């Protein structure tokens, strides 16, 4: 028997909507503009977040559960949840995402569900223009972004333009950038998330490292020298410096066995008491590191390796 849902008292109607998951609420929102408006008036769903990594799907996170909305060219599949594989319990809902209309669909989810937080954003060759628009939307609406993943694209110019926008975006947890940039590329972070992982980081210079407030820093293919790393460690040893830092990993071909780091010539490792291992949050595990101490008594662990990919590892 059909139920005249919109004739329910407002408070009761909102209670009904609050019990719905994103699939159910999306289907209801498509019944009529009046229903969509009623859902929107229900207020912000504080534990709902949205994620984007392609032009063909949108994820809505509700607590620990994720709901996938994926483009289909078959209208008969609309509003029917499907499984990718029968053996996999996760499901998705086919929806219409018109060519060139991804931003409109993204805004529909933001506005209808009153979402004010992005779990993560990721790029592909096809979605950089849309990602740039989404970045601008998050700036205009002051939307918090948990993670930003930038993968290596053939055309780096789009990513170069996007990097400038990251300083305006409110990215809180992490940035992972694997893009290979041309040798003349320059970028300076003016705001940082909790961690950064830059796979091609020659442009991230010593000045930026010395002023970086991150908890975790990972820099691949960097230009840091023994002298740069020595300056960093000398500053770290002073009380009050780098209060957030817990993990630093740097790869650089400029690390050598000619110049000392904190009075030690690389490779630097603990040979007196081997089989010691240290890690941060279960990752970046170091074996046989050297113990160093800050002026205030804080203990850290250091290891410097040479070889094809010289590596500097530091855990507090």
Image (cartoon, rainbow, N blue to C red):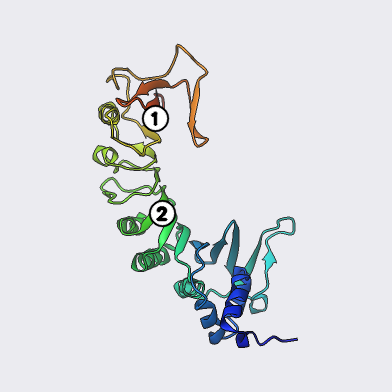
Residue 283 visible in the shown view: yes
* Residue 47 horizontal/vertical position (percent): 52, 62
Q: Is residue 141 above or below residue 287?
A: below
- Count neighbours of disc 2 (C-alpha within 10 A) and say few if under 14, some if 14 to 19, many if 20 or more: few
Q: Quadrant of residue 103?
A: bottom left
Q: What element carries label 1?
A: strand
Q: Which residue is drawn at 61% across and 59% down?
A: 65
The tag earlier along the polypeptide, 2 or 1, is 2
* Residue 290 horizontal/vertical position (percent): 40, 20
Q: Tell me the tag on residue 173.
A: none
Residue 224 relative to residue 60: left or right: left
**How many discs appear?**
2
* Residue 236 horizontal/vertical position (percent): 30, 31
Q: What element carries label 2?
A: loop
Q: Mark 2 points at which residue?
A: 154
Residue 258 relative to residue 8: left or right: left
Image quarter in which the N terminus is found: bottom right
Q: Tell me the tag on residue 314.
A: 1
């Amino acid at each position: 028997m059909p139920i005249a849902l919109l004739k329910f008292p407002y408070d009761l109607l909102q209670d009904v909507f609050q019990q719905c998951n994103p699939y159910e609420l999306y289907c209801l929102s498509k019944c009529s503009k009046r229903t969509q408006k009623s859902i929107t008036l229900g207020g912000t769903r504080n534990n709902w977040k949205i994620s984007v990594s392609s032009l063909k799907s949108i994820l809505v996170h509700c607590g620990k559960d994720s709901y996938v909305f994926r483009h289909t060219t078959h209208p008969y599949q609309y509003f029917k949840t499907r499984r990718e594989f029968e053996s996999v319990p996760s499901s998705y809902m086919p929806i219409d995402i018109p060519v060139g209309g991804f931003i409109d669909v993204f805004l529909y989810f933001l506005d209808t569900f009153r979402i004010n937080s992005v779990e993560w954003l990721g790029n592909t060759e096809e979605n950089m223009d849309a990602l740039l628009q989404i970045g601008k939307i998050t700036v205009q609406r002051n939307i918090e972004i948990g993670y930003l993943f930038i993968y290596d694209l053939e055309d780096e110019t789009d990513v170069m333009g996007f990097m400038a926008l990251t300083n305006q975006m409110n990215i809180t947890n992490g940035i992972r950038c694997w893009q290979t940039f041309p040798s003349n590329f320059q970028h300076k972070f003016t705001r940082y998330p909790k961690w950064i992982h830059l796979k091609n980081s020659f442009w991230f210079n010593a000045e930026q490292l010395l002023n970086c407030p991150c908890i975790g820093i990972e820099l691949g293919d960097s230009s840091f020298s023994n002298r740069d790393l020595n300056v960093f460690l000398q500053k770290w040893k002073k009380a009050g410096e780098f209060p957030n830092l817990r993990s630093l990993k740097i790869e650089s071909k400029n690390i050598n066995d000619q110049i000392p780091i904190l009075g030690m010539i690389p490779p630097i490792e603990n040979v007196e008491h081997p089989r010691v291992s240290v890690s941060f949050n279960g990752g970046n595990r170091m074996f046989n590191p050297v113990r160093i101490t800050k002026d205030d008594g804080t203990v850290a662990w250091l290891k410097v390796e040479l070889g094809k990919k010289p590596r500097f590892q530091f855990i507090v």
